[in-house]
Amino acid sequence: MPLPSNVRLVEVGPRDGLQNEKQPISVADKVRLVDDLSSAGLSYIEVGSFVSPKWVPQMAGSAEVFAQIQQQPGITYAALTPNLKGFEGALAAGVKEVAVFAAASEAFSQKNINCSISESLERFVPVMEAAKANGIRVRGYVSCVLGCPYDGAIDPQQVAHVAAELFAMGCYEVSLGDTIGTGTPGATRQLIDVVSARIPRDKLAGHFHDTYGQALANIYASLLEGVSVFDSSVAGLGGCPYAKGASGNVSTEDVLYMLNGLGINTGIDLDQLISAGQRICTLLGRDNGSRVARARQH
Amino acid sequence: MPLPSNVRLVEVGPRDGLQNEKQPISVADKVRLVDDLSSAGLSYIEVGSFVSPKWVPQMAGSAEVFAQIQQQPGITYAALTPNLKGFEGALAAGVKEVAVFAAASEAFSQKNINCSISESLERFVPVMEAAKANGIRVRGYVSCVLGCPYDGAIDPQQVAHVAAELFAMGCYEVSLGDTIGTGTPGATRQLIDVVSARIPRDKLAGHFHDTYGQALANIYASLLEGVSVFDSSVAGLGGCPYAKGASGNVSTEDVLYMLNGLGINTGIDLDQLISAGQRICTLLGRDNGSRVARARQH
């Protein structure tokens, strides 16, 4: 299979990234980050999450962020909406695309969102209905696709089942998340092979964490399997590369550097992206999680 | 091409690694590191370098290190010998295998060792002759194979030429080094394709730096091309992951983790390797450059 000639990067830094940073930042700073990412050429930005700020204080003010960002034509600005209340909040804020999530592991589902996988899927039925009624596109995430912190190995068939459920419910694309970063390229290829028996490859995305340093190898393996959409986080936000317990989002800069080297088009300007990442890192007082950004600072 | 079922990792931490750490360490501490690596199951360890301590103070005492390590049967303990004087020192120290190096870039050769590529190769003629006369195996390194800090892009044919010269002179294996870490998987595969027209694939090794985060993707790409020997450095010694100007040796732990995931045999115990890496990092007062080691410290 030839490598894809174009890849879409889904920038999750403002949501998945900032959500996992200890320090909440202001609405104005989030707006600046999203606008910087728009200017750098990202075509898809997950801007925030409509959840209770009691549970996720970092995501407070997502409605204000949506109201203040300079939305550019051709760029998707999405929000995570874990339930109908969140969806209604997003709708009121003028959000045009949302995302929902389920786990491939029962234990993770129970510990993370306190319900079984099938209960979590049922919870999305009204969200999907409301989305359809309002012409809102929905993207699906599946977590723990290559390993679970509680259950260990995960059967690819189980991942395929959950992904197929989300697809059947109306998600136009399903992102397969290696939440704990334990996946390696062979397992990644096998997973895509199994899941693509249920969902076309061009409806799949890869979401890799670099906790064990495997993310780029897994993305390259996914490209070889025909996957052409990947989630990543500017400056590796959400996973401090030095701290214990790092969640380890792969950095958009490092993915982009590899894609550029492979001659794959993304429409993203690496230098502008590095500047956007460096600015938010300075603001957060954290080191830059992108190796490319650190190498360029020489 | 199927993936290799066995891979040999060439541990360069005690030489290429420590040589690039600011702080020289004692002979006893080097001995401990090498012995730890032997115990972890490495089958090839580059122990030191026979060069003037005036130029490379970190490599002082290599003869003493060779005298004091507990050499295990089946493990190769090698030394870098840049010239005949170095070779004679290694021979006197009882070294059984040495390594020589040349650059694929004229500018790098001039700036790094102050002579042209062909002059550097001529300098190895007496080393190769002395090695042959004494039954010593010689491994060859080629640097800057995927980019040069002065010349930028390097023609794969030029790499193939230098590698073939080293092979013709008697090097039993040639290690292709991405010295500045700018290579990406497609360029890596193309390079191996071109070089393997001159040297059999099973006589090639890959030496990748993680400066831009690309090392594991490049190693996976090399495995797909049938390469089954890789150089790496325990704990990423020689390339502080946080500092500017990091040289960026890929960490042995991270490579091993990927190989384990791919079901490829190496004979190395990951836990013991992580312990060896953590011990030397503590001694050097530096953070561990292995993502796997950091993830395991949770």
Image (spheres, coloured by chain):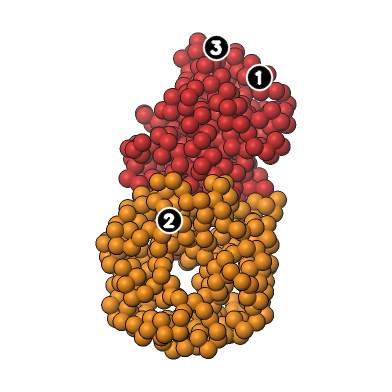
Chain colours: A red, B orange
The residue wearing badge 2 is B227
Q: Which mark is residue A129?
A: 3
Q: Which quadrant holds residue A111?
A: top right
Mark 3 to mark 1 CA distance (whole Å): 17 Å
Frontmost of labels 1 and 2 is: 2
Left or right position of A115 against A9: right
Residue type of the residue flagged with mark 1:
Ser
Residue A21: where, in percent of width, then height? Answer: 62, 44
Foreground tag (2 vs 3): 2
Query: Could you say where residue B138 lies in the image, as x and y percent from the top left?
Result: 43, 75
* Image position of A156 with respect to B158: above or below: above
Q: Are marks 3 and 1 on the same chain?
A: yes
Quick check: can you spot residue B274?
no
The one of A56 and B212 positioned closer to us in this rendering: B212
**Which secondary structure, mark 3?**
helix
Q: CA distance from mark 1 to mark 2?
A: 45 Å
